[in-house]
Image (cartoon, rainbow, N blue to C red):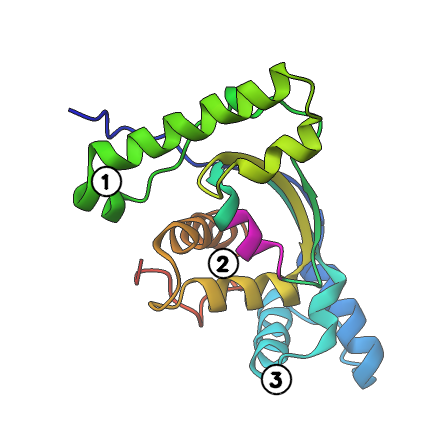
Amino acid sequence: MIDQRRIGMKLELIDCSHNALGNIVMAARGCFGNKKKNPTYEDDINLVRALIKQDHSPLEFAWCMFKVSGISRACCDQLTRHRLASFAVQSWRYTDMQQNEFIHPFSALETAGESVKAMEDSQRKFYALLVKNGVPKEDARAYIGLGFATEVCFACNFRELRHIIKLRLARGAQKEIRKLAKEIYDICSDRWPWLLSDLGGDNV
């Protein structure tokens, strides 16, 4: 029987704005000329909620950086389509792809079983053969499928973060990136409960 275990997706919050709420509020009040004296925390939260409702640019004055590993290159490719974020992806030119796990979609495992494992093994062997015979890794990687695992660091502002989560939590999104979006949602909701309360994260 095929071993259906898969590498665990691991997401880490590496860094972030240390005064995210204050940054957003300061930018917003500068834009709108809000001269309210001694605003309370609740005033700040209400202001941010209004900004979120209108998707206003002051949300861009707070940011966060994540590191994610144990995702397929297919999932990574979807994530990196978000052009307003910054990405540093594991290079398949410099790394030995034989060391990477393979992320089998559970639907494929259930349908094809041993056949998908054989396909993975054949890719590994062919890649190793090419490299052994002097083919540069940047050329040998052409024969490596999008199921191989990778890691990526990415950073974005809160406006783009909301866009990523909203789009990738949708039920029509691929299951793997929905799982990633849910983990991002959970981390951010815990740290900044005012940021994502309108999106909901229980649909994954």
Is 83 positioned to the left or the right of 173 in the image? Answer: right
In the current view of this chain or complex, which residue is farthest to the left? 1
Up-down relation of residue 192 to residue 95 (above or below): below
Instruction: Using the rendered view, name the quadrant where residue 40 is placed.
Output: bottom right
Q: CA distance from mark 1 to mark 3?
A: 43 Å
Residue labelled with disc 3: 54
Q: CA distance from mark 3 to mark 2?
A: 18 Å
Q: What's the residue type where badge 2 is placed? A: Pro
Q: What's the residue type where badge 1 is placed? A: Leu
Q: CA distance from mark 2 to mark 1?
A: 37 Å
Q: Residues within 10 Å of mark 2 (few under 14, many from 20)?
A: few
Most foreground residue, 9 or 111: 111
Q: Which mark is residue 109?
A: 1
Q: Residues within 10 Å of mark 3 (few under 14, many from 20)?
A: few
Up-down relation of residue 196 to residue 10 (above or below): below
Mark 3 or mark 2: whose residue is earlier in sequence: 3
Instruction: Using the rendered view, name the quadrant where residue 109 is placed.
Output: top left
- Assign a secondary structure to mark 2: loop
Tell me which segment is drawn in magenta. Answer: 75-81
Residue labelled with disc 2: 193
- Magenta span contains residue 80: yes
- Residue 114 visible (yes or no): yes
Judged by depth in the image, the label closer to the viewer, 2 or 1, is 1
- Magenta span contains residue 96: no
User: At 62% from the left edge and 61% from the top edge, which residue is drawn?
Assistant: 81
